[in-house]
């Protein structure tokens, strides 16, 4: 669908509009409005990945009021798990098609999710629960989480695991153009990413708002002591929260690797930081906020390339984080886990 | 740990404290003699010019960990972007001295010494700039903002043409002293001078931090760290004191940045990865939050230990671990272990140790009335503010 149909006035792609001759450190600020469509599409796609990872930050924050700094490692572990199980163990390298592809695809997303969920649960047991039992200071949790994140990340960099370079992701799904949207080609993997993210979001939203476990999660996020008095097994609910957050992190990791075709030991770092920004932008602790924040961050950082060089994308994203924290620390939708 | 051991170690500490200013002279003499001790006959590894280079690296890491110790250890603010201040100090030095080629942008081309106060000033101002809007936020937000700040600074340097983007700035001049008949030229051939330059810097930082810690400011910091709400209710100017912690913490990294830039003569954004910010944090936490001896020990562990291991292994992998990157995995694990089993670090600060054991003593009052002030912290539950 062309943008014009939506009421946008779209200049031809090759027209470069010089907004001003403002000399910005030797670089002229010129905006290429032909990029509006493609950057919009890219923004939605990358935003969906951020949103999926942000769900993990938001779930843990909602319940424990704690930023799970190690979630970036959880994200990477899922993709690496799929890499080992499907690539190294089953040796799937050839592109597949038909029901076989569908099966392997679903299996890999499930495996990625489960590996990450187990990783997150292990993290909770090893790095968080001992501190929680002792009633340690906030700072201790953060430091412990950073330790866990760097431990996992740099273990993966060692020669006996991934090693320092990029490793090819099992290519069971050949990337091919699916359709065109707003002057840009959407490939099948990118389309899959968006659909999967939406699906995950709907499932999680239903789960938290309509099941018994979801109700205990919401109870914990309201008042941890009161919910314990009401008979909620808080250790189990916290573990469930980590499992759920980790699962979506792993799905995101698998989708990310599928789309870009590689796994690398530090793939979680920038993605994790951006997803955190997304969670804060939407209102950390809020599931719908994570989704909206993710998509918005994807749009902001990609559409900024219309006027500013793409090399500034990360700076834009982190500046958004700093600005949101200063201007509206509760985010767009506020800090509530339930809908 | 038995009580007897504790008493004897306390006796030594008390005796050391009684020495007053002489302590610093002894410390200076000890630091002065380290290169002599690093002789081949006494110390089997890290001798010669390589050893002295590592000594220098350890020296500026001590400055860094001392600064971060003020922020994290004394005031309890988690700063994950500390190296950004170090980087700003180094870049300020580069832009204020006659560095680079003829096309290089300079603010001024002053002698290297003249850039030192400005390197400190820029680092401190950056602390003020990032601290002022964010220190009102809760601690965990601050951590992530500082992490983002590091990336903003690094990525900006990677993209700005005036600092040559990823190519960095080369040819930063070495300092020299030509006055009162003294002629000292710092450079590659006079490696030891660099270490001697660091000794007064480290001592000055130690004296500054010790005096601050024992002043009203230090008590304010302790109050904020232990209970921010209670501190505010008691009239502690919370935001102002947090800002001071940030600014003072940044000052030593400005000095370190200057020394780094004029020593290595070449700086590039990729010399300041986020990893370094995390490693400084590891040094402070493993050594002991808020403890000066701990910060020094932490810096030595983080910088020297991997080098010793690397030299002993001849650069080969150990149990599959690469000596360069494997250490980060090990230090990451060490952070978790320290947080769980020994929250005060290897050399816990005296005040923190007392606080932690008094919190334990409050629980013990019911069962017995003996004082347990000297009890080591890892056997006592820490009565700090609670996270559910």
Image (cartoon, coloured by chain):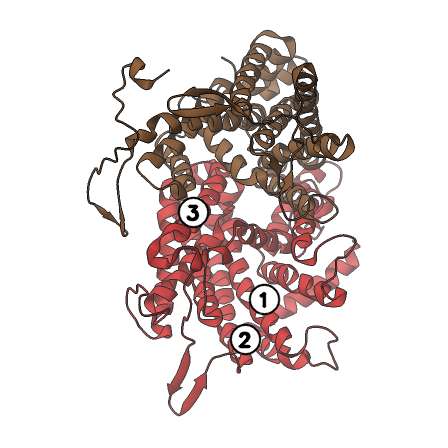
Of labels 1 and 2, earlier in sequence is 1
Instruction: Please give the residue where the numbered disc 2 appears in the rendered image.
Output: B195
Residue shown at the point (47%, 80%) measured from the top left: B186
Badge 3 density bin: few <14, some 14–19, many ≥20, Cα 10 Å = many
Left or right: A241 as drawn, with respect to B42: left
Residue B58's x, y, as percent?
Answer: 59, 66
Of labels 1 and 3, earlier in sequence is 1
Disc 3 element: helix
The disc at residue B58 is: 1
Residue shown at the point (27%, 52%) measured from the top left: A26
Residue situated in front as seen by the camera: B222 or B128 = B128
The disc at residue B242 is: 3
Q: Is residue A333 visible?
A: no
Badge 1 density bin: few <14, some 14–19, many ≥20, Cα 10 Å = many
Residue situated in front as seen by the camera: B9 or B89 = B89
Count of marks, rendered view = 3
The disc at residue B310 is: none
Residue B302's x, y, as percent?
Answer: 63, 59
Residue A243's x, y, as percent?
Answer: 67, 24
Q: Where, by quadrant of the figure, is residue A91 drawn? A: top right
**Tell me, what hue is chain B?**
red
**The disc numbered 1 marks a residue on which chain?**
B
**Tell me, what hue is chain A?**
brown
Question: Which quarter of the image is occupied by the N terminus of chain A?
Answer: top left
Disc 2 element: helix
Q: Evaluate if marks 1 and 2 touch, with contact meaning CB atoms under 8 Å apart.
A: no
Residue A187's x, y, as percent?
Answer: 51, 24
Check if mark 3 and mark 2 are on a common chain. Answer: yes
**The disc numbered 3 marks a residue on which chain?**
B
Badge 2 density bin: few <14, some 14–19, many ≥20, Cα 10 Å = many
Q: Residue furthest bottom?
A: B181
């Amino acid at each position: 669908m062309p943008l014009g149909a939506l009421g946008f006035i779209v200049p031809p792609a090759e027209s470069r509009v010089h907004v001003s001759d403002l000399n910005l450190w030797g670089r002229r600020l010129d905006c290429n409005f032909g990029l509006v469509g493609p950057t919009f599409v890219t923004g939605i796609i990358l935003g969906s990945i951020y949103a999926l990872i942000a769900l993990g930050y938001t779930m843990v924050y909602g319940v424990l009021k704690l930023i799970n700094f190690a979630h970036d490692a959880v994200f990477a572990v899922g993709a690496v798990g799929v890499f080992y199980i499907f690539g190294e163990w089953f040796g799937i390298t050839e592109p597949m098609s038909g029901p076989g592809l569908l099966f392997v695809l679903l299996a890999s997303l499930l495996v990625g999710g489960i590996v990450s969920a187990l990783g997150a649960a292990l993290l909770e047991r090893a790095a968080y629960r001992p501190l929680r039992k002792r009633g340690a200071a906030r700072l201790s949790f953060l430091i412990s989480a950073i330790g866990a994140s760097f431990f996992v990340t740099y273990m993966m960099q060692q020669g006996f695991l991934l090693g320092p370079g990029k490793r090819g992701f099992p290519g069971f799904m050949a990337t091919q153009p699916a359709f065109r949207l707003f002057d840009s080609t959407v490939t099948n993997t990118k389309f899959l990413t968006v659909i999967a993210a939406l699906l995950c979001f709907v499932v999680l939203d239903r789960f938290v708002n309509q099941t018994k476990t979801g109700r205990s999660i919401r109870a914990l996020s309201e008042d941890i002591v009161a919910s314990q008095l009401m008979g909620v097994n808080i250790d189990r609910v916290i573990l469930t929260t980590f499992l759920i957050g980790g699962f979506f992190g792993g799905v995101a990791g698998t989708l990310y690797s599928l789309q870009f075709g590689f796994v690398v030991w530090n793939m979680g770092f920038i993605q994790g930081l951006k997803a955190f920004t997304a969670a804060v932008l939407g209102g950390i602790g809020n599931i719908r906020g994570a989704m909206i924040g993710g998509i918005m961050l994807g749009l902001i950082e990609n559409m900024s390339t219309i006027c500013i060089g793409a090399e500034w994308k990360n700076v834009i994203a982190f500046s958004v984080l700093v600005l949101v924290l200063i201007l509206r620390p509760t985010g767009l939708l506020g800090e509530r886990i339930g809908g | 740990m038995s009580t007897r051991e504790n008493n004897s170690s306390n006796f030594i500490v008390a005796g050391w404290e009684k020495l007053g200013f002489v302590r610093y002279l002894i410390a200076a003499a000890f630091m002065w003699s380290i290169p002599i001790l690093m002789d081949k006959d006494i110390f089997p590894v890290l001798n010669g010019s390589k050893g002295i280079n590592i000594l220098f690296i350890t020296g500026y890491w001590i400055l860094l960990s001392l600064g971060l110790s003020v922020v994290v250890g004394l005031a309890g603010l988690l700063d994950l972007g500390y190296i950004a201040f170090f980087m700003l100090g180094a870049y300020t030095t580069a832009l204020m001295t006659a560095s680079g080629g003829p096309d290089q942008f300079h603010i001024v081309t002053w002698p290297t010494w003249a850039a030192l106060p400005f390197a400190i000033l820029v680092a401190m101002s950056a602390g003020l700039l990032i601290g002022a809007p964010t220190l009102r936020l809760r601690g965990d937000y601050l951590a992530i903002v500082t992490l983002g700040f590091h990336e903003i600074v690094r990525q900006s340097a990677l993209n700005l043409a005036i600092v040559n983007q990823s190519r960095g700035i080369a040819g930063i001049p070495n300092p020299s002293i030509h006055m009162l008949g003294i002629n000292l030229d710092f450079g590659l051939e006079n490696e030891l001078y660099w270490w001697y330059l660091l000794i007064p810097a480290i001592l000055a930082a130690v004296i500054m931090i010790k005096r601050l810690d024992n002043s009203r400011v230090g008590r304010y910091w302790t109050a904020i760290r232990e209970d921010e709400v209670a501190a505010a209710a008691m009239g502690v100017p919370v935001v102002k004191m947090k800002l001071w912690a940030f600014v003072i913490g940044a000052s030593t990294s400005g000095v370190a940045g200057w020394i780094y830039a004029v020593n290595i003569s070449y700086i590039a954004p990729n010399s300041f990865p986020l990893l370094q910010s995390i490693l400084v944090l590891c040094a402070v936490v493993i050594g002991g939050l808020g403890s000066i001896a701990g910060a020094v020990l932490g810096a030595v562990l983080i910088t020297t230990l991997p080098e010793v291991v690397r030299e002993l292994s001849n650069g080969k992998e150990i149990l599959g671990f690469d000596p360069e990157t494997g250490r980060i995995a090990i230090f990451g694990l060490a952070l978790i272990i320290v947080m769980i089993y020994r929250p005060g670090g290897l050399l816990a600060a005296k005040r923190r140790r007392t606080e932690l054991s008094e919190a334990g003593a409050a629980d013990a009052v019911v069962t017995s009335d003996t004082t347990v002030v000297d009890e080591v912290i890892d056997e006592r539950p820490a009565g700090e503010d609670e996270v559910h």
